[in-house]
Amino acid sequence: MLTIRAMSDGKGYSSRHLEHADYYAEGERVVGHWQGHGAELLGLGGQVQSEDFEALRQGLNPANGDFLRQRQSADRVAADGTTQSHGRHLYDFTISAPKSVSIMAVVGGDKRLIDAHEKAVTEALQELEAHAATRVRQDGANTDRATSNLAIAVYHHDTSRELDPQLHTHAVAANLTYDGAEGRWKALQASGIYERRAYLTEVYRNSLARQVRSLGYEIENRRDAKGRDGGFEIRGVSEELRGKYSQRSRQRDEAIEEFTEKNGRPPTDNEVAVLVRETRANKLIEISTDELHSWQRSRLTKKGSPQEFVKPSILRGFSHLLKSDIFGIGHGHALGLQ
């Protein structure tokens, strides 16, 4: 699923959050990488450096510190000098994997699924970038022009703030895009991306589904209580197990239900994004990656045996992991296959 968060500040977002996953492990750091034609135009490639990320956040050229946009501030200021609204500095396009994929990748140890997620993210971001645009206001015009370029810093995480296994990627774009017709950098007009959020979600899901099936898994489509498309899950990973590792989803659903009862209507996509942020823990839990993964695996056997939660059908093409002791009690035994 794709969610979009427009950020009006974001100072230190890379160094304080993106580089530390969703927990704090001393000495460990998530390394981002650049993607997008806009990044290429700026000579940015490979690993993301915090100083380059911060420069773009401010609308500066990382190479020389010059302002890239003619209009240096994106804030809207009235004639009397008061700020009417704060401009957007960053767009965080977050793409999350189905829960069953995260469980089998992180808890089950199938790193192939992590690669599949990252490849699907790359494909979705390429399509997303194609819909980047900028506003055209010259000579009385009032329209948008496709630019199809962004400078995107991509960070892959594998855990939620509540320490559940959750593959997700933060693809953070600066509020910049190069207008080739005018020969200059301008602010991003992201309305076309917002309008295609559901479509872009499907681009990611379709790519991931193809790869998951090619790895030997069976998948099944899901729909919610209202019959709406809920994407796919790996067949055999039960709803009960997915629920055990879905604390953030429960928090989100409870917040949405409370909002609906209070306002007499469901929240919009933007309001859901706000609710998600407001229900998220502010402080990162300090834990090493090894400790985290051990704790995640231990939760399999709490409040019921693993055999009750995971069915043998998920392991078609998964026999290479049976000899490992990833669950601490023998993988095959943990999955009810031996």
Image: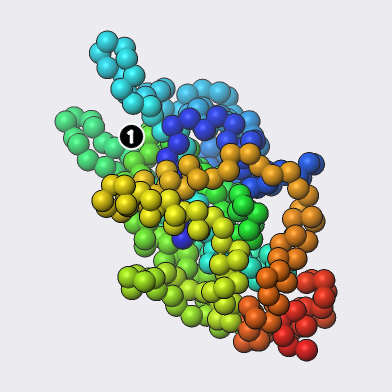
**Nearer the observer, 45 or 256:** 256
Q: Quadrant of residue 81?
A: top left
Furthest residue toward top: 80
> Which amino acid type is marked by label 1?
Glu
The x, y position of residue 135, in whole percent, is: 29, 37
The x, y position of residue 16, in whole percent, is: 64, 36
Residue at horizontal 59 percent and vertical 31 percent from the top: 12
Q: Quadrant of the C terminus?
A: bottom right
Image vertical order of residue 192 relative to residue 85, above or below: below
Residue at horizontal 82 percent and vertical 75 percent from the top: 329
**Nearer the observer, 233 or 329:** 329
Q: Quadrant of residue 84?
A: top left
Image vertical order of residue 230 relative to residue 183, above or below: below
Q: Quadrant of residue 45?
A: top right
Image vertical order of residue 235 relative to residue 249, above or below: below
Left or right: residue 273 versus residue 218 is left
Left or right: residue 125 versus residue 325 is left
Mark 1: secondary structure: loop
- Is residue 63 visible in the rendered image? The answer is yes
The x, y position of residue 289, in whole percent, is: 76, 53
Q: What residue would you read off at disc 1?
A: 182
Furthest residue toward left: 140
**Nearer the observer, 256 or 95:** 256
The x, y position of residue 112, in whole percent, is: 67, 70
**Nearer the observer, 230 or 200:** 230
- Is residue 118 visible in the rendered image? The answer is no
Residue at horizontal 62 percent and vertical 52 percent from the top: 162
